[in-house]
Image (cartoon, helix red, strand yellow):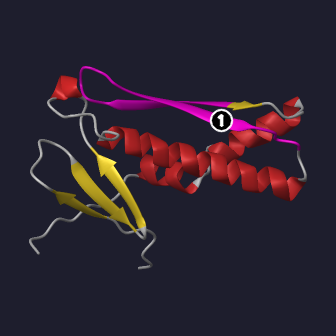
């Protein structure tokens, strides 16, 4: 198998504040004060949505550039909701201020459904846990 991404998360013991190392990038995860954290950084689900949104925006930008389309400023708005049975739904809304026609928008919406992170989330992932 090919490794696609790696991350290390370190719990420093300050409530839910956690330091994250991804490559040479340093991030922070925490929970909001309403959930017992200090709101020092995004919560875990925020990172899930951020990853999906970034993958969507990057993929669509690459596609539009390849096609020579005037995408302009692109934004991806995301919401994650859970029902009473803990089933998750993600709503993704795309906005672009470029001059795109209906056929181009239709194609971008099709491409958004095929982004790598979208496919991973839809398929699920096998997670194994072991003691280090």
Compared to residue 84, the image places residue 17 above or below, namely: below
Residue 8 in the image, given as x and y percentages of width and height: 28, 65
Q: Nearer the viewer, residue 109 or 21?
A: 21
Residue 11 in the image, given as x and y percentages of width and height: 15, 56
Q: Nearer the viewer, residue 41 or 80?
A: 41
Q: Nearer the viewer, residue 34 or 111?
A: 34
115 left or right of 16 in image: right
Main SS of the magenta part reads strand
Q: Is residue 77 magenta?
A: yes
Compared to residue 45, the image places residue 102 above or below, namely: above
Q: Say which residue label 1 marks.
A: 75
Q: Is residue 55 magenta?
A: no
For the C terminus, give its image quadrant. bottom left
Residue 31 in the image, given as x and y percentages of width and height: 24, 36
- Which residue is painted at 67% across and 53% down in the image? 59
Residue 53 in the image, given as x and y percentages of width and height: 54, 43
Give the farthest residue toward the bottom: 1
Compared to residue 102, the image places residue 13 above or below, namely: below
The region drawn magenta spans 70-94
- Which residue is painted at 36% across and 54% down in the image? 27
Dot 1 lies on which element? strand
């Amino acid at each position: 198998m090919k490794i696609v991404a790696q991350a290390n998360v370190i719990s420093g013991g300050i409530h839910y504040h956690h330091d994250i190392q991804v490559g040479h990038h340093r991030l922070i995860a925490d929970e909001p004060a309403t959930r017992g954290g200090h709101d020092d950084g995004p919560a875990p689900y925020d990172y899930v949505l951020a990853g999906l949104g970034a993958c969507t925006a990057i993929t669509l930008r690459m596609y539009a550039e390849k096609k020579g389309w005037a995408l302009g400023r692109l934004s991806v708005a995301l919401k994650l909701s859970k029902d009473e049975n803990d089933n998750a739904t993600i709503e993704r809304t795309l906005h672009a201020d470029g001059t795109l026609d209906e056929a181009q928008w239709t194609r971008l919406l099709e491409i958004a459904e095929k982004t790598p992170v979208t496919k991973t989330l839809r398929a699920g992932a096998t997670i194994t846990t072991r003691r280090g």
